[in-house]
């Protein structure tokens, strides 16, 4: 079972129960292979799917660092999703105004207060950041807004627009994707130590299902017991592909 199959499963269930499927894509490079597999997957109700992004860099979509640009190449351009169901964060716009606009789009399309997205995909940085919620950022304490503009920490390129924790915690399913040995320490600090200095730890308190999809290298520092527990949980909650 792969992440793409999990998404197809959740999408079919969401459309059955609520008539539509709302999915927020993660930024970064890790999820791109999963996006390519999702593009090739059968059974995805694209006509009833709405795509969002959990964060974006404040750059135009044709910039190589654009999260939308990366996903457009491997997924959006390859699936029959109605163009008005692709809700891009406009990285070229004034960040604070765009954060307000994007929040209003989410509130218009996603039911619930706060809006409950069906699936939010997230990555994790080596410093434990997720979406564009970086360690020590005031955005981590944001309760009023669902989407905010943030200044990146030193060494991180581009201003960002990001989901805040109230929106992330409300999701029906939060799926973290992490691969490679460079993420092993961050994964262990989050999943074993529940280190609050790591923003990704805060997402463990999500109302819905929280799934971590790791390769062997990223899971390297987890105990065998946790790995086995994870494998069993994955089998339980990822029914046969639809
Ligand atoms: C971003 C992401 C960010 C990303 C992690 C992991 O815009 O950079 O939203 O949270 O998911 O930094 O990035 P990689 O998958 O490239 O390691």
Image (cartoon, rainbow, N blue to C red):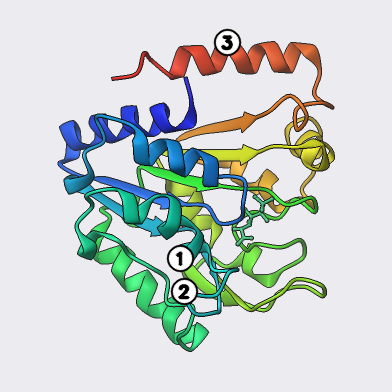
In the image, what residue occupies the spot 45% across and 77% down? 99
Image vertical order of residue 10 relative to residue 129, above or below: above
Q: Which mark is residue 232?
A: 3
Residue at numbered disc 2: 61
In the image, what residue occupies the spot 75% across and 37% down? 180
Query: In the image, 38: left or right of 194?
Result: left
Q: CA distance from mark 3 to mark 2?
A: 39 Å
SS for dot 3? helix
Nearer the viewer's eye, disc 2 or disc 1?
2
Nearer the viewer's eye, disc 3 or disc 2?
2
Query: In the image, 218: left or right of 143?
Result: right
Q: Residues within 10 Å of mark 2 (few under 14, many from 20)?
A: many
Image vertical order of residue 160 relative to residue 25, above or below: below
Residue at numbered disc 1: 146
In the image, what residue occupies the spot 43% across and 81% down? 98
**Figure quadrant of the C terminus:** top left
SS for dot 2? loop
Query: In the image, 75: left or right of 16?
Result: right
Q: Which mark is residue 239?
A: none
Q: CA distance from mark 2 to mark 1?
A: 22 Å
């Amino acid at each position: 079972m792969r992440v793409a199959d999990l998404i197809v499963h959740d999408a079919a269930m969401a459309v059955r129960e609520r008539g539509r499927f709302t999915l927020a894509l993660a930024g970064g490079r890790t999820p791109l292979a999963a996006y390519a597999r999702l593009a090739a997957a059968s059974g995805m109700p694209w006509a009833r799917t709405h795509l969002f992004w959990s964060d974006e860099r404040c750059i135009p979509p044709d910039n190589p660092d654009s999260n939308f640009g990366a996903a457009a190449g491997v997924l959006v351009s390859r699936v029959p999703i109605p163009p008005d169901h692709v809700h891009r964060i406009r990285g070229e716009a004034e960040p604070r105004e765009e954060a307000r606009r994007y929040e209003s789009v989410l509130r218009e399309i996603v039911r619930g207060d706060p809006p409950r997205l069906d699936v939010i995909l997230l990555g994790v940085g080596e410093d434990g950041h997720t979406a564009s919620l970086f360690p020590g950022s005031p955005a981590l304490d944001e309760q009023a807004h669902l989407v905010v503009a943030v200044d990146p920490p030193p060494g991180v390129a581009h201003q960002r627009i990001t989901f805040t924790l109230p929106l992330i915690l409300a999701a029906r399913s939060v799926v973290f994707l992490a691969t490679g040995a460079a993420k092993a320490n961050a994964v262990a600090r989050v999943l074993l130590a529940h280190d609050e200095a790591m923003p990704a730890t805060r997402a463990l308190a999500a109302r819905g299902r929280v799934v971590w999809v790791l390769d062997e290298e990223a899971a390297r520092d987890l105990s065998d017991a946790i790995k086995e527990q994870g494998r069993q949980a994955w089998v339980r909650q990822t029914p046969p592909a639809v």
